[in-house]
Amino acid sequence: MSKKQTLTLFLLVFFLGLISACRLGSPKRPNVILIVVDTLRADHLSSYGYFRKTTPFIDELSRDSVIFKNAISSAPWTTPSLASLFASRYPAALGYEGEEPIELDESFVTLAEVFKHNRYITKGIVSHDFISSKLKFDQGFDSYNQSNARGYGYVSSPSVTNLAVSFLNNHKKEKFFLFLHYFDPHYDFILHKEFDYYPDYHGSLQSGEYLDSLLTKAPTMSADDLKFLNAVYDSEISLTDKHIGRFLKELKRLGLYDSALIIFTSDHGEEFAERGDYWIGHTKKLYQEQIHVPLIIKLPRNKKKKVINEYVGLVDLMPTIVSHIGLKTPAGYICIGQRIDLKGNAEPESRAIISDTRRWAKLQSVIWKNWKLIYDQQKDTKELYDLKNDPLEAQNLPPKNPQRLAEIQDILKQWQEQIVLIKSEYKITTKRPDFSDEEKRRLRSLGYIK
Ligand SMILES: [Zn+2]
C-alpha cells in the first residue's frame, strides 16, 4: 500500500468514524404535535371534572399524559395569548399594548423556529385571521395552511383534521412539528345535532345567534337561556373533540402515537354572563373563566397519567418543550417562562403567574400561592381573591387582607419593571396588519371589528 493509499484509507476511516459517531451521538428526537383549541375554558372538559361528558377523546389522551389542573393563558384573546406561547414572553413585552392585533416581531425566536433550526419539518394548520401569516405567525413554518379562517357560520374542525391526516400520511417517515389550531368552540355557537345536550329547550335563543343579538339579550337571559347557551358551547366542544379523536386515531394507526410528544391546550376561555354586567365573550376581563385553560402533555413512550396542581402559564410551554427533548433556543434568547420538569414527580416551583389584557380594558392579574390580584389600570382598582376557597371569584377580599395585598402588589410592580427592562433590550416594531376587505369581512362577522 503506497503512502498515498494509506493516507486515503486513514481519511476514509476517519470520516466514516466521524459519521457513525454523529449518528450514534444524535439523540432520537420525537415528533412534536401542538393542538390548540380556541376559546376552550378548562372547566368544560370532562377530564377537568365537568358534569357533562364533553370530551371523551381528549380524556383518553389525558390518561397517557401529564395533566395540568391549573394552567393560565397570558392573555384572554387569541393573538397575544398565542404570541406569548410561541415566543415565551408576556404580551406587553411583545408589544401588545393597544387594542388591535400587531405583527409578531421577527426579532423574537418562536417555537417553530427552534424546530426548523433543528431540521424538523414544520407545519401549521390554523383557523383564525388573528394568527395568520399577515400577523407573522408563520415564522419558522415550512408550510402554514390558513384556509379554514372563514368567519361566521363555518364549521372548521372536520377540515383541520382532514388536512392534518393528509400531512401525517405524507410525512410519516420524517421528523416533524405539527401545529393544529381548532376554532369551533369560539363564537358563533352552532348546535350540532349529534351533540344536542338540551333538546327540550323552548326559549328564544337560536343556534348560531348573531353576536349583537346575544349581547343585547344577555342582561335579560333566564337561567334556562344560559343553560341552553352553555349546552350549545358544549356541542361545539364535543364536535371538536370528535375530530381531534379522528386525528389521534390516525396517529395510532400509523404507529406514530407512542413515540410522539403531544401538547393539548387552548388560548383562552369564554364568559357566559357570570359577572354583574351580564357579558358574553372574552378579551376584556381576567376572571378564571377567561384565562384558566386546559393543558395536557403526552410524553413520548408514556402511558402513565400524572396530575400537576401547581399554577403554570402558557408562557412556560416553549422552554418546557424545547428542553424536554434536548433542544436549545439560540444563544442570547432568554425565555421568560419556567422550564417545567415533566419527568420528575415533584410539583413545579410555586411562583407568580401573570395575565394581561389591553383590549377593551387595561387589566393585569397575578396568581400567587392560590391568591389572585386583578388590577384595573384605568380605574386604579384592585380585587383580591382566594382561589382555593373561592374558585369562582365571588368574594373580593382586599380590606381584610392588607398584608397579602401588599405582597402581591409588590410582585406586580416587579413584573412591570421587568417588562420595561426587556422592552429596552429588544427593539421591536409594533406594526398593525393591513387586513384585506375579505379578512375584514370575516373579522366583522365574528364581532372583532365594527
Ligand atoms: Zn382565541
Image (spheres, helix red, strand yellow):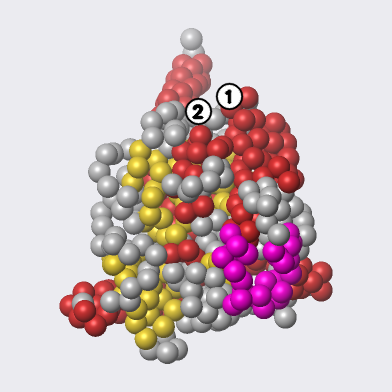
* Mark 1 and mark 2 residues within 8 Å of each other at the beta carbon: yes
Image quarter of the C terminus: bottom right
> In the image, 358: left or right of 415?
right
> On screen, 337 above or below 435?
above
Q: Which residue is mark 2?
A: 258
- Label 1, residues with CA under 10 Å away: few <14, some 14-19, many ≥20: few
Identify the residue at the far top of this view.
1
> On screen, 117 above or below 12?
below
> On screen, 180 above or below 190?
above
Relative image position of residue 93 (x, y in whole percent): 45, 73
Give the residues drawn in magenta, as a range.
203-227
Relative image position of residue 337 (x, y in whole percent): 38, 59
| Residue that appears at 49% across and 29% down | 259
Per the image, is 151 magenta?
Answer: no
Q: Which residue is mark 1?
A: 255
| Residue that appears at 65% across and 55% down | 232
**For the residue marked with disc 1, what is the amino acid?**
Gly
- Label 2, residues with CA under 10 Å away: few <14, some 14-19, many ≥20: some
The image quarter in which residue 239 lies: top right
| Residue that appears at 48% across and 17% down | 9
